[in-house]
Image: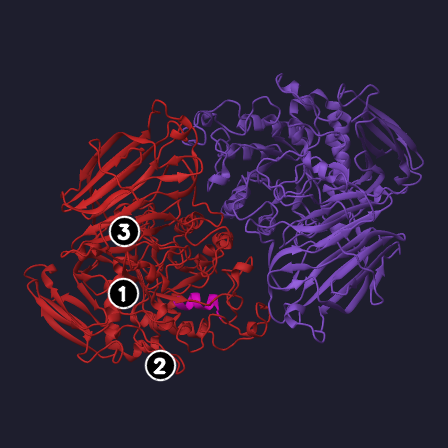
Chain colours: A purple, B red
Amino acid sequence: MLTAAFSAAAVGISSPSGELTLNVDVDAQGRPFYSLDYKGTQVITPSLLGLTSDETDYTRGFSIASVDTVTVDRSWEPVWGEYATVRDHFKELAVNLAENPIAAGEDPAQASKQPGRTMTVRFRLFDDGLGFRYEFPVQPRNNYLTVRGENTEFNFTGDHTLYCIPGDYDTDEYLFSETTFSGLPDALNNYGRHTEAQRTGGTTIQTPMLLKTADATPLYISLHEAALAGYPAMLLDVDTEAKGMKAHLVPDRLGVSAYLQLPFATPWRTVIVSDDARDILASQLVLNLNEPCAIEDTSWIKPMKFVGVWWEMFTGNQKTWAYSDDYLAKPGVTDYTTLTPNGRHPANTENVKKYIDFASKHGIEGVLVEGWNEGWEDWASYRKNRQFLFDKPYPDFDVDELREYAKSKGVKLIMHHETAANAADYERQLDRAFQFMKDNNYDAVKTGYVGAIIPRSEHHTSQWMVDHARHVIERAADYQIMIDSHEAPRPTGLCRTYPNWLAQESARGGEFESMGGNPPSHTCILPFTRLKGGPMDYTPGLFETRMSYYNEGKTGQAGTTLARQLALYLTMPSPMQMACDLPENYERFPDAFQFIEDVPVDWSDSRYLEAEPNHYITVARRDKHSEDWYVGAITDDKARTALIDFSFLPKGEKFEATIYEDAPDADWKDNPQAYRIRTVKVDSKTKLKQPLAPGGGAAMRIVKK
Amino acid sequence: MLTAAFSAAAVGISSPSGELTLNVDVDAQGRPFYSLDYKGTQVITPSLLGLTSDETDYTRGFSIASVDTVTVDRSWEPVWGEYATVRDHFKELAVNLAENPIAAGEDPAQASKQPGRTMTVRFRLFDDGLGFRYEFPVQPRNNYLTVRGENTEFNFTGDHTLYCIPGDYDTDEYLFSETTFSGLPDALNNYGRHTEAQRTGGTTIQTPMLLKTADATPLYISLHEAALAGYPAMLLDVDTEAKGMKAHLVPDRLGVSAYLQLPFATPWRTVIVSDDARDILASQLVLNLNEPCAIEDTSWIKPMKFVGVWWEMFTGNQKTWAYSDDYLAKPGVTDYTTLTPNGRHPANTENVKKYIDFASKHGIEGVLVEGWNEGWEDWASYRKNRQFLFDKPYPDFDVDELREYAKSKGVKLIMHHETAANAADYERQLDRAFQFMKDNNYDAVKTGYVGAIIPRSEHHTSQWMVDHARHVIERAADYQIMIDSHEAPRPTGLCRTYPNWLAQESARGGEFESMGGNPPSHTCILPFTRLKGGPMDYTPGLFETRMSYYNEGKTGQAGTTLARQLALYLTMPSPMQMACDLPENYERFPDAFQFIEDVPVDWSDSRYLEAEPNHYITVARRDKHSEDWYVGAITDDKARTALIDFSFLPKGEKFEATIYEDAPDADWKDNPQAYRIRTVKVDSKTKLKQPLAPGGGAAMRIVKK
């Protein structure tokens, strides 16, 4: 880690408000470095910059040749999201670095690997944080880089609290640790090895991650990246002694992180910082650093809620994605011409019709069906060359009949493309798979990449797979298809550029309620971390949380009350939002389900009212298509009273709030389904004390009266 | 290498004629092995069989549980080829191997890795050789294999002569060595390192290869494989001391050769053997071991001759595939929006029209155009994610105008898809590329894979690329597109199953006449080796052989007389046969070009009249669509008199032969263009002494009079 002081030649800028200050310099070896201050306090101490490649060293031997600064204040209107309009207001500093002249007596071979090389580090300093990236213009000699690593550092001032998950090239489906630099090695040791995933060695973590200082008025610092394209995802190697972090680019299995042709600009490295945790949640910095929408006609992109044939297979009631159990007798072998039905396959025509009926009755736009196509018996993708065909339904799934039935009920079926991580084969089939969707009236697809990646040179988040994701989203746009991707590279705000990328998983989602459970704190940290990249298909709406309900032999329980599940529609916003539970469970609680029917998935405004990572979040949002407001509040495993200040309501106007709340005796563990629904009059002057049960939450619909 | 004797329990069969005898047994360790005799002489001494995988050892611990034998005599009609009908006549021996019972006192863990495992070795013994493959039925436990190697041996009786090229995972574009087991290490050391190819270590060679014994009546033995699919290509590790060879499966870059799901059958290992070299050339054994045609309607598959914008770029006259030279100023960088034409780009509308005119005038069906699409300036595919778009013509290539012009002239343009070895990206584009072809009236495409393969886990001939090739050929069939593939895995007779796979390169072709040259012996060994897998796009028809003719500064000369180039249309048969030279060179020798106009590319019968590897070949073929016969004869760098026995002609009928021959003073080096054309009367009793110049040849058209 760097120990350098800024020289007289250092350059710097302040954010528009003046609260953030950036300084940039090169040290005696010509190594560029930067620091970041917030309200006069150091956030990031001098930290190195640069990139190493087989061909050229872009970490040292530089001088600052020139700088360009500009202030930008503009706004843009997302196709969907938390705000109707997003302000993009920053001061930019482009530091143009050039080869140092070779000093007298210096060995030219040592001084530089590529005379004439130049690199620009472009910084954008917002009032809520910093973004910077490396830009490599055309070089006089070599314009190809075989990138082995990135030198970017984030050095901190003390033993901050860290909220993070283990570094992994293949998955981010972990619970978050709340630890410190000092405690990180132990925290990482506590993680089990995720199946088929490749954990990095050492003390490596993933972004998006959050830090919190130990100050009396703590600072909250979010680290991530924006606009990840043509480059591998970034992990962070943590120096627990020096309290610093350094970029760790995901390599391919040959050890190369990126193959670049210049000119090239890397993704943005992002630092959101505030002394108010709510600002971290409200920040649109990552989206602002992405390119504008690349799709001209976006009229076909439609946010939606959906139910699906999905939870049935998680609940331990023996339902299966697979149509047959033949494979149990002959491991690894399935004769698809002579399948014996196992009778526990929910993706069948009759059952799907029930979901369509339910969706139609309750105004839910979509029905996802998992397990509709051949291949689930025979799961060993990495040792096969093809597992799934995306136009090969099981014999009990009648594509034609369901297409017509869904049409007649005004419901859209949602396609499922589980690739078993054979991304190469998915590309082979992609055009035909999308054409099959259009032919059968599907407009959206949930993609999945469970397993080890083919091409076998790749990890889930290596450069080729990042390119794969963009290829799929672009080709989908050609067919006017919306995507909800699971096990894809974690989001970095690309949904601004490709708004047909409605949602992603890329974190430990609701499905884990049946596989060990998610503690209440989990959804109190995801909005500070994972959601900074983009919406998550978390699959809220679980009304029946005890696994023993589904199957006596199954243990475990979701870390939530019923009312909290409603609040998640506000605290985990997504334009493609599931109501994950079984229709019959919703029919047991029709008054509570009314909230899911009512809640929008697209917003014109959002106000974070209360927030503390891992502990609580309270947010108010205004429906994009009406004047209605909605509030969601959640807490961790301790009871809490949310303080809801309704000053976000237009002054002088009267509203009625329908409140879906935990009953007084509710508790996620012992009494999760105890909820109440009440109605109160509210206006902009109302301040409401809203009790939340342990692991509980509250959801409100606020309508003008 | 194995030293074992056959036991009383050995099993065996003889070929239908009785000339070939096969024996199979297991040794004391339960290792299966085989031997092959020809006319009472050992051809292959006891040689091990089997396959190793991470999961299960299929090389030892077996007994012969049962055997099945059957005699088959059938025939089939290829869509195109050397014969109208091919006889498929063999005796089959299926040796069903099963787990040995565990002996008393034996450690079960040592005895076997997978109790209950079974494997069948299926042998087909023809009168001209042997084919055998491994078949893995469904196993009781594990049905996935991670294959690291194959145990198949081919052990020989002495220090035979070997005709072979170096083992290489990525290319087969080498001249052949004629050496011995003892001489092989030195012979391999003489090869330079092929650009971007990956030579194996040690004394490894490739198939198809040929051996010749040192006996007074020598045996000729051809080794190759048939029906390579779902498996990597086979190289051969040579034990120069023991005079044996062992299969060496091409691995991926992670070191794994094959990922298999059972049931699975490997490709056939093939041994063609005879004491008459002509039988090696005539053998249809490799095709017989392939599956029947998989394409129902083959009416659109049309053998053809073609000319092309191609040789212009090889001749050293500075013509380029690239449209622009901008990249020379900025290595690795091309701005395709502002290309400056270099004026030396033959793939332009005007020039292509000249080729269309020439083809139309001379009844040549196709015109290939290379360099028509963007990307050639910027050749560094391995460090890029996309190089070529297959619907992006250069500005001087007017797709619409040429489509209509070719149509009006009754000529088909042939597409060129150079992928720069980015097979993954080719698959991304494949549907669109083929649709673009159909939209523009192209029915055939020459594909190319120059460079290091992407996916970066792969080699040109590793399992994934073998699968890629089949994917492309199958998808092409869907679009009724014919393929001529270059730098693809070497052919193994799959053109029987997919007759739209008209031709392949997969050897050192005519293009090398401008890059070091091909000695006359080269085309005297290719039919014994490379052509046993299928037709080669060798690109014969070179009339102007001196490179200095094209460019004073360029040296080098093709190892051929002009007359020999005509003979190659017979000795190197292909249903997609180029006339490779420039139209203006053909116009200098219109009487000789008449033969290229006349010669067919599809045959109803073929008779190999004389043959000795590396030295000479004389062959007669009957046109599939008439009663005309054609003869081609070539020699090495020494003059020779071919003895042509016309007894293949129908008895009692009179023919006239137009003979295109070397002039008496012709010589490939000093007087290559000295040829004569004469006419002689022939019938089935004629025996003609036909002189051939050093490096020369003769071609005859024989028409009933």
Which amino acid lies under the numbered mark 1 shown in the image of this protein?
Thr
* Residue B373 location (% of width, % of height): 49, 65
Up-down relation of residue B35 to residue A270 (above or below): above
Q: Label 2 belongs to which residue?
A: B549
Tell me the quarter of the picture where residue A679 sits.
top right
**Marked residue nearer the N-terminal end (1 or 3):** 3
Could you confirm whether marks 3 and 2 are on the same chain?
A: yes
Instruction: Identify the subunit bearing mark 2.
Output: B
The single residue placed furthest to the top in the displayed view is A552
Image quarter where the N terminus of chain B lies is: top left
Q: Front-most of B274 and B284?
A: B274
Which amino acid lies under the numbered mark 3 shown in the image of this protein?
Lys
Q: Residues within 10 Å of mark 3 (few under 14, many from 20)?
A: some
Position of A65 compared to A384: left or right? right
Q: Residues within 10 Å of mark 1 (few under 14, many from 20)?
A: many
Q: Front-most of B608 and A656?
A: B608
Tell me the quarter of the picture where residue B643 sits.
bottom left
Position of B693 compared to B586: left or right? left
Mark 1 → mark 2, Cα distance in angstroms: 23 Å
Is any part of residue B573 visible from this angle? no
Query: What is the span of residues highlighted in magenta in the rendered image?
Result: B397-406
* Residue A377 location (% of width, % of height): 49, 31
Mark 1 → mark 3, Cα distance in angstroms: 27 Å
Image quarter where the C terminus of chain B lies is: bottom left
Q: Label 3 belongs to which residue?
A: B243
User: Does the CB distance between marks 1 and 2 fall below 8 Å?
Assistant: no
Is any part of residue A549 visible from this angle? yes
* Residue A575 location (% of width, % of height): 70, 41
* Residue drawn at point x = 65 percent, y = 59 percent: A52
Mark 3 → mark 2, Cα distance in angstroms: 47 Å
**Marked residue nearer the N-terminal end (3 or 2):** 3
